[in-house]
Image (cartoon, rainbow, N blue to C red):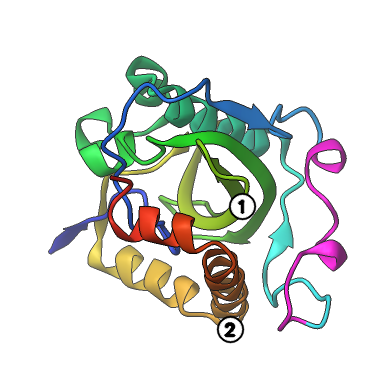
């Protein structure tokens, strides 16, 4: 039996802003040129529960192709550029409205970190992308963490959102439940809650779906 597996999200803000056409959305620190220019070192990762260490089994991404793919993906999402997104994923027909509308109401996306771990035969790399989001009309920065499945065909990287066998599905599920990943998720969750607790207005905005 096969299982359909879309682009996965470890921590995704539970909002769907109703207002479209907010100010120009910008990508910062996401040109994908070289890892050392884009992503701060793992010892500088903003967390209060990881003792300044990178999560076990996760590595800071140094693969230029993956960095370029990640930068292009978030740029296309920020711009709502469906043709660009279609060119970045393995199965464009599987793109959902939740993915396409993810960043409505977000004025700025700052891609801060990309961590990777080896995946499966179909999904060669699992990437964990840490972003900082700024909403139109708010100053508080909100963290976000995505899990992206990346396939590699002769050096051409694509975000995999197709169908996996049960065996590969289970293997990827085990990766997402690993100690290093759960540490990272818990750290970002803490930062997420702290950010919202510091800004009651933004917390209400997100809680109410961006209305």
| Residue 95 belongs to the span the image colors magenta | no
> Percent x, y for residue 147?
48, 56
Give the total of numbered labels.
Answer: 2
Q: Residues within 10 Å of mark 2 (few under 14, many from 20)?
A: some
In the shown orientation, is residue 118 left or right of residue 176? right
Nearer the observer, 157 or 206: 206
- Specify which label sits upstream in the sequence, 2 or 1: 1
| Residue 46 belongs to the span the image colors magenta | yes
Which residue corresponds to the image point at 44% horizontal and 64% vertical from the top-left? 10
Question: Which residue in the structure is indicated by mark 2?
Answer: 179
Q: Can you say whether 179 is above or below 89 in the image?
A: below
Nearer the observer, 146 or 202: 202
- Element under disc 2: helix
- Callout 2–callout 1 Cβ contact below 8 Å: no
> Percent x, y for residue 120?
46, 59
Nearer the observer, 164 or 15: 15
> Where residue 152 is drawn, which disc sits there?
none
> Percent x, y for residue 12?
41, 57
The quadrant where residue 174 appears: bottom left
The quadrant where residue 154 appears: top right
Quadrant location of the C terminus? top left
Residue 50 seen in this snapshot: yes
In the shown orientation, is residue 143 left or right of residue 173? right
Question: Which residue in the structure is indicated by mark 1?
Answer: 140
Q: Can you say whether 5 is above or below 100 in the image?
A: below
> Percent x, y for residue 139?
62, 46
The Cα–Cα distance between marks 2 and 1, rounded to whole angstroms, is 29 Å
Residue 157 seen in this snapshot: no
Q: Residue furthest left?
A: 1
The quadrant where residue 58 appears: bottom right
Which residue corresponds to the image point at 53% horizontal and 56% vertical from the top-left? 144
Q: Find the magenta span and give its range.
A: 35-50
């Amino acid at each position: 039996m096969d299982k359909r597996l879309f682009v996965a999200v470890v921590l995704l803000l539970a909002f769907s802003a109703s207002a479209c056409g907010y100010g120009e959305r910008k990508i910062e620190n996401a040109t994908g040129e070289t890892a050392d220019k884009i992503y701060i070192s793992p010892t500088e990762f903003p967390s209060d529960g990881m003792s300044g260490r990178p999560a076990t089994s996760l590595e800071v991404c140094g693969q230029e192709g993956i960095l370029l793919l990640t930068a292009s993906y978030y740029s296309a999402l920020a711009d709502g550029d469906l043709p660009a997104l279609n060119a970045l994923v393995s199965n464009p027909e599987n793109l959902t409205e939740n993915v396409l509308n993810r960043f409505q109401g977000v004025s700025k996306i700052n891609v801060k970190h990309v961590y990777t771990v080896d995946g499966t035969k179909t999904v060669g790399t699992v990437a964990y992308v840490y972003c900082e989001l700024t909403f139109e009309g708010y100053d508080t920065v909100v963290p976000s963490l995505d899990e992206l499945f990346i396939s590699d065909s002769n050096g051409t990287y694509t975000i995999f959102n197709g169908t996996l066998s049960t065996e590969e599905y289970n293997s990827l599920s085990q990766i997402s439940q690993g100690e290093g990943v759960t540490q990272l998720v818990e750290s970002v969750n803490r930062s997420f809650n702290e950010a919202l607790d510091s800004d009651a207005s933004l917390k209400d905005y997100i809680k109410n779906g961006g209305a």
